[in-house]
Amino acid sequence: MKLVVLAGTPGSGKTSVLLHTIRSLIKSGKKPAVVKVDCLWTDDDQRFSKLGIPVHVGLAKDMCPDHFTIYNTDAMLDWGTSNGADIVLNETAGLCLRCAPYPDECLAICVIDVTTGPNTPLKVGPLLTTADIVVMTKGDLVSQAEREVFRERVLDVNPGCIIVEANGLTGKGAFELAEMVTGGPDVCENMVLRYNPPLAICSLCTGETRVARKHHMGVLRQLDGFMEYRGE
Amino acid sequence: MNEELTLTILGGVDKDGVPEPVKFLEVSKGEIIGIVGPTGSGKSTLIDDIEQLAQGDTPTGRSILINGKRPDAVIRVDPRKKLVAQLSQKMHFLADMTVVDFLHMHARSRGKGPELVDRVIELANTLTGEPISPDHYLTVLSGGQSRSLMTADIAVISDSPVVLIDEIENAGIKKQEALKLLSGEGKIVVVVTHDPVLALMASRRIVIRNGAMMDIITTSREEQDVCGRITQVDNWLMSLRDTIRRGEIVEELA
């Protein structure tokens, strides 16, 4: 069983790129299945279902979607196995850009939109910096020079990644991605995350709604950058 | 590095999946080749196939060979090894940076030195009316200024042996000078155009219809003569345009 975790900034074209990649995988005789994780709502499962593959939707609702993804990785793989899949493709919602739900033994793909400008790669964080493959989308909307500058910025923050220029409309790049997915690692027992999750649980996570500082506990960072632990 | 450069296009299929009539086309070093056809017929798609050195993995199913061989994967993606420079139709800058910062970063991405930056701006300013300053933000440049800057960038920084140009005539820049600048020494130039001057400056032109390469026309002696005559008309129109831009009065019909 292989696991692909596909993350990226909102509206970057994750689903479109994935749809083309799945078509290419099916053509080469693979049996992919998709788990789409979103926060509140999605209808992407209908788009994936048209390809005739097993699809599962996970809505994180009031849980952080990346935490939800990590917590449910085992269950996704079990579900994939029981549906006869040999590759589980997990598209995550990606939210605060502070952590990255990539286990070590998976193919980690980050999708990023070129039209957001060359400073964006510096803002995306571990989602981008710990990915194996960075997919640049919407390159047809900018000049070649601007694409190359963007690419350079991606390599500044993730020098070891493979960059694929893809297009969700034409399917450009999908063939290359499908080949890399096929050559990706097999999952193993006891996978660990590539990057540590954010600071430990604070009182907001457990439902505290009062704003004043005195009501909050946990590992907290103050406006001046000072980090403290406040417990009972 | 590009001693014996040839570019080969192996035909794929048209928009309906039918094999295209032209199955093989080889372009040699120093040749300017045109792409003509109605709008929406697939001219830019052919340019894109060449830009990404397609290997039967694009919707057209075309393959591009370099010196008769399939190019390495590295050549397809690494800008430092890229054989193809493209001047695309889409020319709005989205990067919120100054001209000089952008050019420095582009030079770095191509593995070139920062000394080329001034040269790019200087050259760009020979193609456009209002000068571009190094401190201008990219997003304030006009369409013509952006095109001029990218033309100069391709001539100096990208400097690849294959240059692809998409409808340079729409840019409001000195198109023949731009073409001369881009074709440089022994480059392969592929130019998509509706402009008779540019189309007839090419030695051959590919005719596109419904996504397919239908025919290849070699520019005849007669067409070369026509090209010479319409160039004069074109230069005259260009000088009239300049007169009007300067705010002067057009006095006589030559």
Image (cartoon, rainbow, N blue to C red):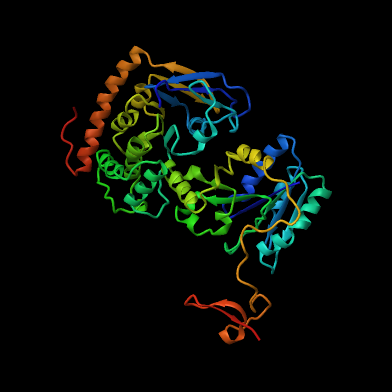
In the figure, residue A97 lies in which quadrant? Answer: bottom right
Where, quadrant-wise, is the C terminus of chain A in this rendering? bottom right
Q: Is residue A87 left or right of residue A147?
A: right
Can I make out residue A10 in this image?
no
Q: B51 or B39: which is nearer to us?
A: B51
Q: Is residue A12 above or below residue B232?
A: below
Taking the image as shown, residue A49 lies to the left or right of residue B103, namely: right
Relative to B38, say whether A119 is above or below: below
Percent coordinates x, y for residue A66 in the rendering? 66, 62
Q: Position of residue A59 (x, y in %)?
A: 72, 62
Q: Is residue A61 left or right of residue B27?
A: right
Q: Position of residue A111 (x, y in %)?
A: 58, 50
Q: How many labels were placed on the picture?
A: 0
On screen, A103 above or below B230? Answer: below
| In front of the other: B91 or A158 | A158
Q: Nearer the viewer, residue B202 or A27?
A: A27
| Res. A192 in view | yes
Rendered location of residue A28, percent (x, y)? 71, 34
Q: Residue at x 30, y 53 (%)?
A: B136
Residue in view at x 69 percent, y 42 percent: A22
Q: Residue furthest top?
A: B221
> On the image, which quarter does residue B165 sit in?
top left
Outermost residue to the right = A82
